[in-house]
Amino acid sequence: MANTPQKSGIKIIAQNKNAWRNYEILETFEAGIALMGSEVKSLREGRVNFKDGYVRLADGEAFLIGVHIAPYEHAVHTGHEPERERKLLLHAREILILAAKVEQKGLSVVPTKIYFTRGRVKVEIALGRGKKNYDRRDDIKNRDIARDTEREVARYK
């Protein structure tokens, strides 16, 4: 998926499917990310893993935590730390909005995808509410029902 060109000028590097599975996504934001050169080269190869990634808001700044960007193989000895904190580039008002919602409503900010747009690396972050087990089961049940309905409709055509 990392090398498929998109029509809108966006090249998706990676998507965090667990974010959609574990959270009810309420709102999304696009953020730039401060990276080293070796990290950008590693991202071009699609070598990123969201694992338990999340966004920490502190002192009017946003940081991406827990996202693993593999070291670039051809980098000189001064490569990058794979799981370092990376600063997200957001407008101050966006950070204030996120911080207020996270504080008041007990929501989480999680990264949902990383992509290139016009040669720059962007991260889509989402404000989400954690799902309970029964919510996840309902989602699975609804998805199965929709799939079965599609199959039956296709069979009668």
Image (cartoon, rainbow, N blue to C red):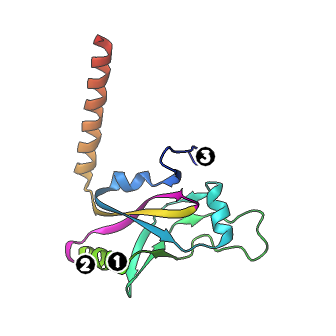
The residues bearing labels 2 and 1 have C-alpha atoms spaced at a distance of 9 Å
Residue flagged by tag 1: what amino acid is it?
A: Ile
**Disc marking residue 100:** 2
On screen, residue 65 versus residue 149, left or right, reads right
**Secondary-structure class at tag 3:** loop
Specify few, some or many for label 3: CA neighbours under 10 Å numbering under 14, 14-19, or 20 or more. few
Whether residue 113 appears in magenta in the rendering, the answer is: yes
Residue range highlighted in magenta: 103-119
Residue 110 percent location from the top left of the image: 39, 65
Residue flagged by tag 3: what amino acid is it?
A: Asn
Which residue does the image show at 41% across and 74% down from the upper left? 90
Residue situated furthest left in the rendering = 104
Specify few, some or many for label 2: CA neighbours under 10 Å numbering under 14, 14-19, or 20 or more. few
**Disc marking residue 36:** none
Which residue does the image show at 31% across and 78% down from the upper left? 93
Q: Nearer the viewer, residue 93 or 113?
A: 93
Q: Check disc 1 and report the residue beneath it.
A: 95
Q: Earlier in the sequence, mark 3 or mark 1?
A: 3
Q: Earlier in the sequence, mark 2 or mark 3?
A: 3
Whether residue 44 appears in magenta in the rendering, the answer is: no
The residues bearing labels 2 and 3 have C-alpha atoms spaced at a distance of 37 Å
Residue 152 percent location from the top left of the image: 28, 18
The answer to whether the residues at label 3 and label 1 have Cβ atoms under 8 Å apart is no
Which residue does the image show at 68% across and 68% down from the upper left? 38
Q: Nearer the viewer, residue 113 or 56?
A: 113
Which residue does the image show at 61% across and 46% down from the upper left? 3
Q: Earlier in the sequence, mark 2 or mark 1?
A: 1
Residue 113 percent location from the top left of the image: 46, 57
**Secondary-structure class at tag 2:** helix
Residue flagged by tag 2: what amino acid is it?
A: Ala
Quadrant for residue 96, please give it. bottom left
